[in-house]
Image (spheres, rainbow, N blue to C red):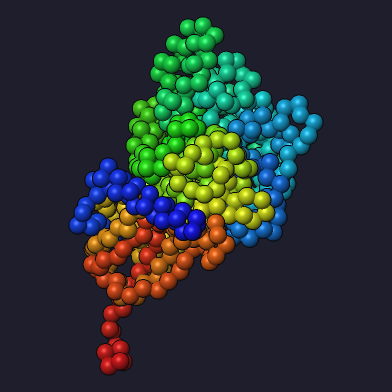
Amino acid sequence: MKHAECRTTTAVLLAALGFWASARLGANADGVRVTVDAGHVVRTVDARLFGINAVMWDPYFDTPETVSALRELDMQALRWPGGSPADDYHWAVNRNGVNLWTWATPFANFVHVATNVHAQVFITVNYGSGTPEEAAAWVRCANLTNHCGFKYWEIGNEYYGNWEHDENSPPHDAVTYARRTREFFRQMKAADPSIKIGVVVALNWKERAGVLLDALRGRQIGTFITQGYQGWTPKMLATLKQLGVTPDFVICHRYPVSLSGWEDDASLLQSSAQWTTDAAAVRRQLKTYFGAANTDVELLCTENNSLGEKMGKQATSLVNALYLADSFGQIAQTEFNSWLWYNLRNYQETNNNNRPTLYGWRPYGDFGIMSGNDTRYPTFYTFKLLKYFARAGDRIVHATSDNKLLSAYAARRADGTMSLLVINKSPGATLKAALSIAGFQPESGATIYSYGIPQDEAARTGAGSPDIAQTASSGAAAEFSREFPPYSATVIVLSPLRELNSTTDEHR
């Protein structure tokens, strides 16, 4: 009876959590109202919104299993060599700094996979210990020698933060970064004028906190004032403007949980709305420093996950998978033209926040959506779910929900169908939604793709399928109702109602 008692206790706990979350966020006792305006196009979907980071320490990257998984996800963009180690990475020898050992995946192996899956590619060049000459040689190797056509090149990774390796003087300094960037631009574009080059921007003051604390600890008051006043992004953009350099794009990274140990499931699941604020803030600063030319600068996100360090169980739980889907839904409504999750594979971390107050059964964290050769986390499956919602060239249309526990997004597909992405963020409550669609008359039949607690439990117990469930449904209309189970992500694909245009059709 021990297992039955455990299931009963879990159900009671989930129901209580669902009631608490509903009360906390003002759930509508009469049900949720979801409205879709199919004629209100928000944006056209860019292929680079379906991307992921690959890392040079992944020993399984250049394998048939990886290629198969990337194709299963219909991955459209890859970034390499991955995260902070890129800032001391010498690509030609596949080593960092003076290390004698080499990383598991050299550049040639990355090229093999990226070209195999026909992904667009982002490369992060070594700013921390590298040179413009080294970066330009990398461009020539990729695009002139090997004809890869890799278009997007980033100058370093997160240099506003003190966690990055930086041998420049002073380190983590916006003005120094901008001045050196000019020479990177000159030499890299001389190697291949067709490439696009981007610079890193900070989204908030917390990303600079470590630099400021280091200055205080060292009693470097001048440095504290210099680095604190105005911040990274304004100083960096102002300096680029003075130098006559307009970047092709700016690079944003988002990790909504500030510190390991501060994870909270309900808070994470409400954090995705920040993408709209971030896009507006960055665009405002670009307008300030580049005037009318700001429209030549794209906004790109090349890293997103829940937490930026010391991953605990939340990262490998269903909660982070729902955050992934919701984060995509939100960023796809902004002007960000890329979204790359961090990352494909990393490693399991067992000694971080695994408290029972967090949902999930895996006693470890991991940045990756996969582990080992082909072990898949919930984040893998909600990423896979996105391909049923939207692809490049589709149009995101306006959709709203009157309950913060139920997110709703909509897309007009190039094949004439409409898809809805609905995410239930309640851990214990099934939410019934009344859906109203203007400007699109669907057929009664619909195809439903879903991922949630049953699939996650199948992965835990080995009974049933852990993969996305696909079912057929009837009863769809311009106005219809549907129930969404707790902690679930659902895609509803609606076909347009056929008009009777012939005598044959009329008499069937």
**In the rendered image, the vertical position of residue 66 relative to residue 121, given as above or below:** below
**In the rendered image, the vertical position of residue 352 relative to residue 26, given as above or below:** above
Residue 129, quarter of the rendered image = top right
> 404 or 62, which lies in front?
404
Residue 273 in percent (x, y) is at 35, 42
Q: Is residue 36 left or right of residue 334?
A: left
**Residue 290 visible somewhere in the drawing:** no
Q: In this view, does 107 lie to the left or right of 25?
A: right
Residue at left offset 51%, top offset 36%: 353
Residue 122, quarter of the rendered image = top right
**Residue 449 visible somewhere in the drawing:** yes
Residue at left offset 40%, top offset 18%: 230
Residue at left offset 47%, top offset 27%: 207
> 473 or 155, which lies in front?
473
Residue 264 in percent (x, y) is at 41, 38
Residue 175 in percent (x, y) is at 51, 19
**In the rendered image, the vertical position of residue 233 relative to residue 352, given as above or below:** above
